[in-house]
């Protein structure tokens, strides 16, 4: 059992500066309303109440004019908004880490990086990640063992069926120590789409922590309907339980 010591403390960086081009819903998907609440608020709320949550940052695009109003309507204790998002997700995460450093967060402190577009995360999954990684030298990520048969393609037809054993789908949060992650992202190449890949390029092996399929990333417009249905089901279950 992990005790409530300063070692339990963690910070969150939520990159939220994307344009949602694949969802293509006329506005950045993080503001899409699910059950009447912006997607990003669902993502941030999953951290509220998790023991150890400390000063955290939501990184939006420099010209974002919506997030401040969203935070006024749905206040999020411990989170501040930084208008320092970059051209890539990695640049937005780096900007978030810099914002935490500027607030005095130390190099060895734990940081959980989480996509604003993964709005179905639960405190239970965060707890699972924390328990696994707080005692780990490198840190790790929530991930899902590949459930389906895996094909590689050539000109739109199956080239070969690949062995799916030992293959995982990377999710977020991804949890690393601030300065190790900062250095890894600084030296990673443009191709990285998550923090774990940057750590791997630095020669480190992040821990895979088994997650759940519901922690998917809203990427396409139809994913919004699926997320909405799950959130609606959760709120019905909560009402029934009270
Ligand atoms: N993100 C970011 N800065 C960028 C690009 C992405 O902060 N320059 C964030 C997104 O806002 C999202 C997370 O990274 O919370 C995951 O990215 P993704 O799902 O790819 O979102 P978008 O980049 O907005 O979508 P798309 O790739 O379809 O344009
Ligand atoms: Mg993207």
Image: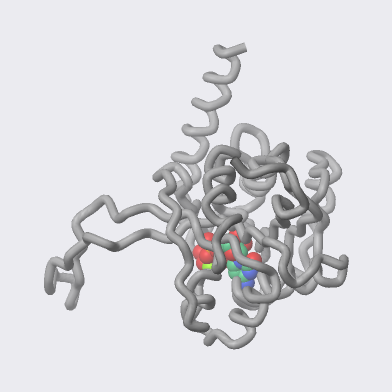
Residue 142 in sight here: yes
Whether 213 is drawn above or below 135: the answer is above
Q: Residue at x 47, y 32 (%)?
A: 229
Q: Nearer the viewer, residue 31 or 160?
A: 160
Task: Point out residue 86 in the picture as x, y percentages from the top left corner.
Answer: 69, 76
Which quadrant would residue 158 be assigned to in this image? Answer: bottom left
Q: Quadrant of ligand 1?
A: bottom right
Does 156 sit left or right of 129 as displayed? left
Does 148 sit left or right of 208 as displayed? left
Whether 199 is drawn above or below 59: the answer is below
Does 90 sit left or right of 100 as displayed? left
Which quadrant would residue 208 be assigned to in this image? Answer: bottom left
Task: Point out residue 187 in the picture as x, y percentages from the top left corner.
Answer: 59, 87
Whether 51 is drawn above or below 237: the answer is below
Does 164 sit left or right of 75 as displayed? left
Instruction: State which quarter of the image contains the C terminus.
Output: top right
Q: Residue at x 60, y 71 (%)?
A: 89
Q: Nearer the viewer, residue 214 or 111?
A: 111
Q: Residue at x 81, y 64 (%)?
A: 82
Whether 73 is drawn above or below 184: the answer is above
Q: Nearer the viewer, residue 224 or 8?
A: 8
Residue 26 in sight here: no
Q: Residue at x 72, y 57 (%)?
A: 11
Task: Point out residue 202 in the picture as x, y percentages from the top left corner.
Answer: 52, 83
Instruction: State which quarter of the image contains the N terminus.
Output: top right
């Amino acid at each position: 059992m992990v005790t409530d010591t300063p070692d339990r403390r963690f910070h969150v960086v939520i990159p939220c500066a994307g344009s949602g081009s694949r969802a293509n819903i006329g506005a950045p998907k993080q503001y899409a309303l699910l059950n009447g609440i912006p997607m990003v608020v669902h993502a941030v709320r999953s951290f509220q109440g998790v023991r150890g949550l400390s000063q955290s940052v939501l990184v939006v695009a420099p010209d974002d004019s919506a997030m401040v109003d969203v935070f006024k309507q749905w206040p999020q204790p411990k989170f501040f908004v930084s208008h320092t998002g970059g051209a890539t997700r990695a640049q937005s995460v780096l900007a978030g880490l810099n914002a935490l450093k500027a607030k005095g967060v130390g190099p060895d402190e734990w940081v959980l990086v989480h996509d604003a577009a993964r709005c179905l995360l639960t405190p239970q999954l965060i707890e699972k990640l924390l328990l696994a990684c707080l005692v780990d030298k490198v840190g790790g990520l929530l991930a899902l063992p590949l459930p389906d048969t895996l094909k590689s393609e050539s000109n739109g037809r199956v080239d070969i069926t690949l062995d799916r054993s030992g293959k995982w789908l990377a999710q977020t949060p991804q949890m690393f120590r601030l300065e190790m992650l900062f250095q890894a992202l600084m030296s990673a190449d443009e191709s990285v789409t998550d923090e774990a890949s940057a750590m791997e390029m630095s020669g480190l092996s992040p821990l895979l922590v088994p997650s759940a399929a519901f922690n998917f990333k809203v990427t396409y417009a139809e994913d919004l309907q699926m997320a909405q249905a799950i959130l609606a089901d959760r709120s019905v279950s909560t009402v029934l339980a009270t």
